[in-house]
Image (cartoon, helix red, strand yellow):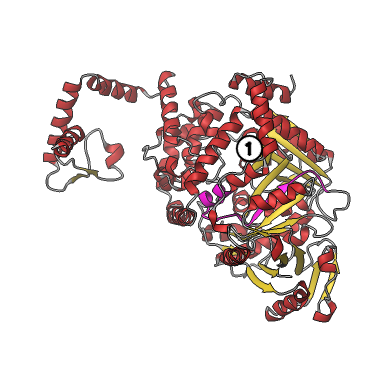
Amino acid sequence: MSARDEIFSNIRRSLGVTGQEATRRSAVAQRLEQTPRGPIPARGQGSAAARLATFISEATRVSATVVVLDTAQAVPDEIARFLREAHLPLTLKRGEDARLADLNWHNAGLDVSTGRSDGSDLNAVSHAFGGVAETGSLILLSGADNPVTLTFLPDNHFVVLSAADLSGDLESVLTKLRRNGALPRTVNIVTGPSRSADIEQTLLLGAHGPRRLHIMVTLN
Amino acid sequence: MTLHPTTPDFKDNAHRALHDPDLQKALGHVQHGFIYKRQSAVERLPEFETLREAARDLKNHVLANLDLYLETYERNVVAAGGKVHFARNSAEACETIVNICKAHGAKSVTKGKSMVSEEIGLNAAIEAAGMQAVETDLGEYIIQLRGETPSHIIAPAVHLTKEQVEGDFRRVHTHLESARDLSEPVQLLTEARGVLREKFLAADVGVTGANFLIAETGTSIIVTNEGNGDLTQSLPKVHIVIASIEKVVPTLEDASLLMRLLARSATGQDMSVYTTLSTGPRRDNDPDGPDHYHVVLVDNGRSAMLGTEFEDMLRCIRCGACMNHCPVYHAIGGHAYGWVYPGPMGAVLTPSLIGVDKGGNLPNASTFCGRCESVCPVKIPLPKLMRHWREREFERHLTPSVQRFGLKIWAFFAKNPGLYSFATRTAMRALSWLGRDKGRFASLPLASGWTDYRDLPAPQGDTFQAQWRKRQQEQSR
């Protein structure tokens, strides 16, 4: 018997089932079809303004920095400001996301290149698919628009989030994702910059991923 | 190739641990840090108890339908372009992974943190096949340098002080300036980041574990704080996921429910920094990501736990809260448990996976204080399960004869309530009189196992039963 067949037959023997029971099969099919939600905490709920306030306070709590911008057009200047204040070079890597491609990077004095990161990029910008107020999390999708290597290899990660894409809870984002069709290779839920407490339980930022995470929420 | 257990030598291990000053210093961080952080996170979420109940019910539903959810999961991994391999035991799991690595001509294999990979002894198998295995979680990297195993399921190097880590880095990172300052944890972290960055970029295969597998989409989920799991899976051309069969959940929403409990119970975070859902290999237009995606599903004794009194243990989501709150773990750390899984969850799981003849010491090392069960996010009745193991051990005559003799004497009195009451009353009064000056005993005949390490408080003069009776009478008045 193959390993697969033996494992299934052991599971079924232990459970005292055959795998053909109509009631079990329909209970499983139903759960997969209906995708019921568990209890949703009240913390992330409320009006759009309340959700934005919660998002900012939760993301700040986990050591991200957050600014609210009137329009996406203000993103290049904001990144340039951040880099200047941190005494960092005005270089930036981005993917092919149209919402980023359309911005006037040159006017802000930024030297922008596109594509994946090979580990030599200091700064990168991504556009989030969504955000979660409850935990201050960003949801990023892999692909040419926002290569996953930009989320992990650079020291400084800038993320643009449209206020319209900010949800109260993760479940709402998952529902939107499912509506989009098949999942991308990775869905990255990012909550603050990289950290580790593996040495004497001392929390330190910048373990393997970005040392800084700067979120720009755009209202229009 | 399963890790060789030293669990049968638990008593010696524990004795050594109690006398290890570095370990005792390091363990102070567990006792104070984890408990306070979890408590703060729980207090910030009024729905926490409701979530625990929902999570328990969800996991019970999955276990009752495990065959059907695994079939669905397998089908959806394949539909997303991945491959699923089944392994009955450690040897098969290692062989499968080593063969995939060889088929791709791998020289270097990076690894995200995975307890099941420790269980099957994967690093040794990869090295034996002539490839390099590189642990990339900071804690795992440190213990790999030391040739040790994790002493905690989420904080593998929690038994070490920063001075010990500094010594290891100086010993191994000989290409770096010897006069460099490594006295602060941040300097150690920065050095490891630099060294491991090169390993990430050079790796041919990346192996990660899975916190959850999603049947609906064929997705594997990992959570990390460092980002090492993502660099492990997104840079090499092959991503291998290793997971035990009970990790499957039905839907994305179900994973979300469990994630609300996992990080809070583990580190007191609301969410870990990086939660990554991985589905298949890179798509046609993707500029990055692996070309191949494999999942190795390991049974290794779990299917035999279904339908038994130990089935509840399969709800475990590996948060580590039980060990963080365990007075026994606080005293001796994780290595004394002698195998992969320490603390209360290890005391239940270890006898299930390596046999009660080898693991029977562990369920005996508990005061049954119940803190583990009270913090378990999926409400596993850990003390009850440890008690079941004690019963099994007794039935199989594995309990030492002195202990069996003692139990027989106790049973004789317990079956004769009048005699029991007389004997305990007499003993309490005698001890109370003898200890009347100091209120405690520094030594007592036949009780050196207790009094060698701490004083025994003298009884207050009456038995529990007598005090209870008195209290009931007072209340009914």
Q: Is residue A188 above or below residue B302?
A: below
Q: Which residue type carries mark 1?
A: Lys
Q: Residue furthest front?
A: A47
Look at the image and give the residue range highlighted in magenta. B260-282
Q: Is residue B436 above or below residue B353?
A: below
Where is residue B271 shown, x and y percent of the image? 59, 54
Q: Which residue is mark 1?
A: B247
Which part of the image, by quadrant, shows the N terminus of chain B? top right
In which chain is the residue bearing label 1? B
Where is residue A137 shown, x and y percent of the image? 64, 59
Where is residue B140 shown, x and y percent of the image? 61, 50
Residue at x 76% of width, y 41% of height = B130
Quarter of the image where one finds residue B32: bottom left
Where is residue A24 shown, x and y percent of the image? 64, 25
Helix, strand or loop at disc 1? helix
Residue at x 19% of width, y 45% of height = B440
Q: Is residue B271 magenta?
A: yes
* B257 and A112: which is toward the camera: B257
Q: Is residue A54 left or right of residue B327?
A: right
Q: Residue furthest right?
A: B284
Q: Tell me if residue B391 can be seen.
A: yes
Quarter of the image where one finds residue B293: top right
Quarter of the image where one finds residue B186: bottom right
* B130 and B292: which is toward the camera: B292
* Disc 1 residue crowd, few under 14, some 14–19, many 20+, Cα 10 Å: many
Which part of the image, by quadrant, shows the C terminus of chain B? top left
* B283 and A32: which is toward the camera: A32
Exactly how many numbered labels are in the figure?
A: 1
Q: Is residue A54 left or right of residue B20?
A: right
Q: Is residue A189 magenta?
A: no
